[in-house]
Each structure stands twice: as structure tokens, then as C-alpha cells.
């Protein structure tokens, strides 16, 4: 197949609301059910893979698609929707030639088996970060793309004035107090991990390589006021398996599960490693310091994988969890914060990243053969209470973000915003939930005039 326009694909990642769209539109004065709050002004953004060309429908991998941002600009009680591709050099080349050039992840083994290195495209399809008044679209295999707001135009790859020397995670962490951004890149070849601190001057002023025993897919990190935290968990790259067509990564618990805690400006010799139970995590909710302890809260699963349908799917789904690492005694404690719901994409009030937070918002999995999100959870670290927002039996959602009300008076004084897809009508809405009345019907349901395919991560950038 050439262009990816099917809804009824043999591949679940191209089917239903995972099917890509091609048209880039701008739509103003959107229809709203309810009322957009007057004290909310800014951009709700959601990015995800949206392939323009699909080289091999059957072997299409969820991570392959070109990046597309869907944005809802909210201002003065009204809303404007835009969707734009990340205009990468690779996509431009493919569109000019009218065909795919870059193979998908599941095709890499074919090239390696022939002794060739497959060329890869920096799609920028995974997540976004806002730092130094600049929005970046991110994919962990490449450099960030600068993207303008609110018009979502790609302005090219960014190397922080020539100071970035490595790949850039999709999940850097910004310290709202110092203005620094902590980031890292991993590699299949040594160095397996390189860490940088980007200062308020927009330059990676501190870069250091960190020794790992094997190359692992490290998707996220955490920060506290003084430390940066790396999960070295055994989702291991294995070139032999890749060449045998057995997938990009394998779960190898013999490699051990460790959390590394590094002083923010530290180097390899300063990192302290803590062993934890067999675990995987894709996403950290937050971390902070309390006395001698570093506390990390994350969506923990029993094992890691990047393919669905590989055994019991629940073993790979996250549940909210807390580890405490004592920097004086070396002790580790570990406890589930929720034994009921499976969830991922945990988010908090953005300016508390690295500092103690009370509330976590996370997307709830509906557990069946193809896990989908069907609700949103609000966790209260103070009371242990878990609140549920259910979107409806035929609705699927995605990552939600917390947007503070203008002049907010408390941590949860604001809104939780996400896209919701209705399978019956095959239509999408941007829904705004009052975070303090979490289980109630949304205060606003903004009708999006085209289907918004499911994607990865979201962001809120206030005007
Ligand atoms: Fe992620």
C-alpha cells in the first residue's frame, strides 16, 4: 500500500482511531457543549505517530509514524483547532518522491541481516517540552524540533547552539525553579547513556557519559531539586534477535533492575545505583526529596515490552507505585499506590516537577487484548483517595494534562484536558474537566471537526 488512509487495517496500530489522517486543517469558532472557562487561556497540544506512507502494513510498528500535532488554542471562551505534521527532512523527502524511503522498526532486521545499517527518520512523534519559551517536539532517536505556537509550524531541528552531542529523550525534565532542563540520550552502541543539563542560556552546559552494562531502552527519567534519576531496566537491545526478526528489544531480567541517582551536575563516578525488584516503567509521575530520601512515583509494570499481544498484556501495563531511596543508608523501600487500576501517562501540575506534589493524573487502561484508555484517574498522595472520570462506554481517550486556572489558589485549582474519541460516531472532542470536580461531566466538550487519531503525549502551554 502506498498512502495510509485505511480504517480497516490488518494492523491494529493502523485500525479504528489509530488510522492516520492526512489533511492539515485550521478550524475556528468550534462548537462547544457546555462552556469553556473564562480563566483558561492557552494551547492544549497532543502529538503522536501519523504515517504519511506505510512501507509494510503488516509490520508497521506503533513508533514508526510521522509526528503530527493536534492543537486546540483556547482564548476568551472560544477555541481554534489545528493539526500539522512535524515537517521533518525525512518526510519532506518522501513526499517529494511520492513513496516511502525510511523503513519501519520491524524492518530493521532485514537490513542488518544483509550487513546494512537501516536509515532512520527523526519523526518527532512522541512528546513535547516547553523550555525557555520555546516548544519542542521530541523523539528519543533524534534531535528536538522547534515548533511555533499557536500555528504549529516546524522550524527545524535544534542542537542548542551546537552543544547537543547525543540523542534527546522524549521526556526531559524542566526545573521550574532553576529554569534548567535535564535530558539524556541512549544508544545501541557505546556510550549507552549520555546526560546533559541545558541551562537558561539555552546551551547544554554540562554533558557526561554514564556507564551502563548493556544498551537498554530508557524512556524516561526523573529529577529532584538536587538529583537526576535514571531507570536502568532490562528492556535490552539485542542485535542478534533483531537480525533474526524477533523484535528490537527483549526483556532480560538477568541484566538486573537498577535506579541510578546522580547529583544534577555530577559525572559517572558520582552516580549511586540502587537495586530494585524486577520491574519496568515507561513513565515517571514525579520525584522529590524528603530528608535523606529520594522518592520516585511511577507507573510500574512487572515486565517491559513494546509489542502488544506478547503474553498476558497486564504484566506490561503500569500501576502507580512508589520507591523510596535512602541516600545515607542505601535502603530501598517499594510499595504499590494502587492495586486496582492499570494506568499510564501520569502527569502532575507541571511546575512541581522535581518537588513534592499532592496530585497525580493518569490515563486508565481498559484491559483487553488491545489496551485502550477509557478514563482518567486522579490520585491524592495526602489522603490516598483515587477519583475516577469515566468517558463513556464507547469512548476512548489519551493522555490528559493539568492546566492551572489563571490565578489558581491551590494545587488542583484548574482543569484536566484531553482528546476523547467516540467509536459510535467516529468523532473526536477536546474535553475539559474541572480537576476539583473530577468525576463530574466535563465543563466543556469542544467538537473537533475531524477525527483526532490516538497518539502519545500531550502538553499545556499557557498564553
Ligand atoms: Fe512516553
Image: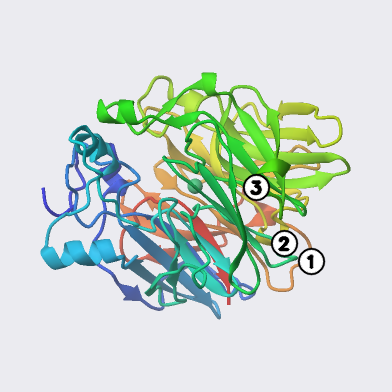
Q: Nearer the viewer, residue 393 or 170?
A: 170
What residue do we see at 22% from left, 52% from top? 102
Tell me the distance, in whole angstroms, between the alpha carbons under discs 1 and 2: 6 Å
Q: Say whether residue 441 is visible.
A: no
Tell me the distance, in whole angstroms, between the alpha carbons under discs 3 and 1: 26 Å
Q: Nearer the viewer, residue 47 or 264?
A: 264
Tell me if residue 318 comes above or below residue 408 in the rendering: above
- Report the side of 130 relative to 354 (left or right): left
Residue at the spot of label 3? 222
Residue at the spot of label 2? 413
What residue do we see at 37% from left, 75% from top? 153
Question: Of marks 2 and 3, which one's residue comes earlier in the chain?
Answer: 3
Q: Say whether residue 283 is visible.
A: yes
Where disc 2 sits, the SS reads loop
Tell me if residue 460 comes above or below residue 301 in the rendering: below
Q: Nearer the viewer, residue 30 or 4?
A: 4
- Of badges 3 and 1, the one in the foreground is 3
- The label shown at residue 409 is 1
Question: Of marks 3 and 1, which one's residue comes earlier in the chain?
Answer: 3
Few, some or many C-alpha atoms within 10 Å of disc 3 (few <14, some 14-19, many ≥20)? Answer: many
Q: How is the image coloured?
A: rainbow
Tell me if residue 351 comes above or below residue 156 in the rendering: above
Where disc 1 sits, the SS reads loop
**Label pair 2/3, CB-CB below 8 angstroms:** no
Residue 121: which quarter of the image? bottom left
Can you give x and y, in whole percent of width and height, for residue 390 in the image? 53, 43
Where disc 3 sits, the SS reads strand
Amino acid at each position: 500500500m502506498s498512502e495510509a488512509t485505511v480504517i480497516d487495517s490488518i494492523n491494529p496500530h493502523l485500525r479504528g482511531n489509530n488510522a492516520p489522517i492526512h489533511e492539515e486543517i485550521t478550524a475556528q469558532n468550534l462548537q462547544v457543549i457546555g462552556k469553556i472557562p473564562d480563566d483558561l487561556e492557552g494551547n492544549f497540544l497532543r502529538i503522536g505517530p501519523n504515517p504519511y506512507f506505510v512501507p509494510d502494513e503488516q509490520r508497521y510498528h506503533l513508533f514508526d509514524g510521522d509526528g503530527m500535532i493536534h492543537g486546540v488554542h483556547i482564548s476568551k471562551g472560544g477555541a481554534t483547532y489545528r493539526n500539522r505534521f512535524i515537517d521533518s527532512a525525512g518526510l519532506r523527502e518522501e513526499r517529494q518522491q511520492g513513496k516511502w524511503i525510511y523503513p519501519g522498526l520491524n524492518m530493521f532486521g532485514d537490513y542488518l541481516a544483509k550487513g546494512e545499517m537501516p536509515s532512520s527518520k527523526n519523526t518527532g512523534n512522541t512528546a513535547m517540552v516547553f523550555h525557555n519559551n520555546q516548544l519542542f517536539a521530541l523523539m528519543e532517536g533524534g534531535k528536538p524540533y522547534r515548533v511555533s505556537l499557536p500555528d504549529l509550524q516546524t522550524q527545524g531541528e535544534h542542537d542548542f547552539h551546537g552543544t547537543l552531542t547525543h540523542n534527546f529523550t522524549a521526556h526531559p525534565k524542566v526545573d521550574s525553579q532553576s529554569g534548567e532542563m535535564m535530558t539524556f540520550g541512549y544508544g545501541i552502541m557505546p556510550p549507552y547513556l549520555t546526560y546533559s543539563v541545558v541551562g537558561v542560556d539555552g546551551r547544554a552546559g554540562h554533558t557526561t557519559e554514564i556507564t551502563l552494562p548493556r544498551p537498554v531502552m530508557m524512556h524516561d527519567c526523573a529529577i529532584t531539586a538536587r538529583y537526576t534519576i535514571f531507570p536502568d531496566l532490562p528492556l535490552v537491545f539485542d542485535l542478534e534477535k533483531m537480525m533474526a526478526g524477533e523484535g528490537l528489544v527483549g526483556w532480560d531480567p538477568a541484566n538486573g533492575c537498577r535506579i541510578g541517582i546522580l547529583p544534577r551536575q555530577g559525572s559517572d563516578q558520582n552516580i549511586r545505583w540502587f537495586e530494585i525488584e524486577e520491574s519496568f516503567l515507561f513513565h515517571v509521575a514525579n520525584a522529590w526529596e524528603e530528608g535523606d530520601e529520594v522518592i520516585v512515583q511511577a507507573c510500574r509494570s512487572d515486565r517491559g515490552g513494546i509489542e502488544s499481544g506478547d503474553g498476558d498484556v497486564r504484566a506490561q501495563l503500569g500501576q502507580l507505585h512508589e520507591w523510596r531511596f535512602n541516600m545515607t543508608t542505601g535502603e530501598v523501600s517499594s510499595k504499590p499506590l494502587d492495586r486496582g487500576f492499570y494506568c499510564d501517562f501520569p502527569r502532575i501540575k507541571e511546575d512541581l516537577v522535581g518537588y513534592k506534589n499532592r496530585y497525580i493524573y493518569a490515563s486508565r487502561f481498559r484491559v483487553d487484548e488491545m489496551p485502550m484508555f477509557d478514563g482518567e484517574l486522579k490520585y491524592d498522595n495526602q489522603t490516598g483517595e483515587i477519583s475516577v472520570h469515566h468517558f463513556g462506554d464507547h469512548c476512548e481517550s489519551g493522555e490528559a494534562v493539568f492546566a492551572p486556572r489563571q490565578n489558581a489558589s491551590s494545587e488542583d485549582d484548574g482543569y484536566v484536558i484531553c482528546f476523547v474519541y467516540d467509536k459510535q460516531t467516529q468523532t473526536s472532542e477536546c474535553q475539559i474537566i474541572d480537576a476539583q470536580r473530577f468525576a463530574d461531566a466535563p465543563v466543556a466538550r469542544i467538537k473537533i471537526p475531524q477525527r483526532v487519531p490516538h497518539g502519545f503525549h500531550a502538553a499545556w502551554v499557557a498564553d
